Amino acid sequence: MSITVTQTLDLKGLSCPMPIVKTAQAIKALQSGDVLEALATDPGSVPDFIAWCRSTGNELMEQTKEADVFRFVIRKR
Amino acid sequence: MTEEWEAPHPAPTVHEDAPRKLVIFAWSGDLDKVWPQLILATTGAAMGMETTVFFTFWGLFPLLKNDKKHGRNRRLTGENWMQKMLSSMNHGGTEHLKLSKMNFAGMGPWMMGKLADEHKVASPTQLMELARDMGVHMVPCQMTMDLMGLAREDLIDGLEEPAGATSALLEAQGAITLFI
């Protein structure tokens, strides 16, 4: 089953705290159930994304890596 | 090639009963402390925490407007010669912050800013605006304003009403508190 992504957020090159801050802002503008795809290159953002999803209750559906880009697929709670 | 991928180190455990409030006492006006103040404040807001920053003592100066009057060139606030002298030596705003070490008459912050640009680290000016946009409660310390001769109109817009230590400590109840 493929996931329909509502919005893709390009966070490549950004450093802490911007990947999480921009993700939070984007999620805020979405509807419950919408899916956000976030692309980041900051390795420090990886544990941050996992922690952020856990603490905010948004679902981290997929987490992949392609070359230097970390991809997170998050469903808004 | 796309790969399913596990974090190299486990993310911190989230405790259900962890405080959902963050209160930062921003005491320092040095670049190397203003940065973490604002990074933690914006992150707290991003995590959905009720976030308050109480700006006191040297920490109040980054709240001054970044204009000609208040920024680097010739900010002369205050009512008496002592406050005016202080304002001429301690520039306000977020654009010309000093480092607590390796300042080298401004060379250090200049290099730090250049590195930050290259690594796409948001500047204190950007983070200050972000914090405001994200609903961080930014509270200037009334006593410091009186002491240093800073009026409400010298400070940026979008701040909460100036307050005192009691309201700050009350806000800090049941919150994660940081003194930076």
Image: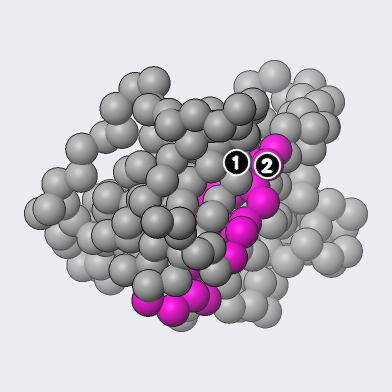
Q: Position of residue B156 (x, y in %)?
A: 66, 72
Name the residue at 55% across, 36% down. A70
Q: Residue A40 carries which label?
A: 1
Please report whichever mark, 1 or 2, sits nearer to the chain's N-terminal start. Answer: 2
Q: Residue B71 carries which label?
A: none
Residue B32 is left or right of residue B86, and the answer is left
Above or below for B75 versus A43: below
Count neighbours of disc 2 (C-alpha within 10 A) and say few if under 14, some if 14 to 19, many if 20 or more.
some
Image quadrant holding the N terminus of chain A, namely: bottom left
Question: Which residue has dot 2 on it?
Answer: A12
Specify how the rendered protein is coloured. one colour
Query: In the rendered structure, does residue A8 fall within the stretch colored magenta?
Result: yes
Name the residue at 33% across, 43% down. A51
Q: Which amino acid does label 1 sit on?
A: Ala
In which quarter of the view is residue B54 placed? bottom left
Query: In the rendered structure, does residue A60 fall within the stretch colored magenta?
Result: no
Q: Are marks 1 and 2 on the same chain?
A: yes
Q: Where is residue B92 in the image (x, y as percent from the top left)?
A: 71, 55
Q: Give the range drawn in magenta.
A: A7-32
Name the residue at 70% across, 47% down. B123
Residue B33 is left or right of residue A74, and the answer is right
Evaluate if marks 1 and 2 touch, with contact meaning CB atoms under 8 Å apart: yes
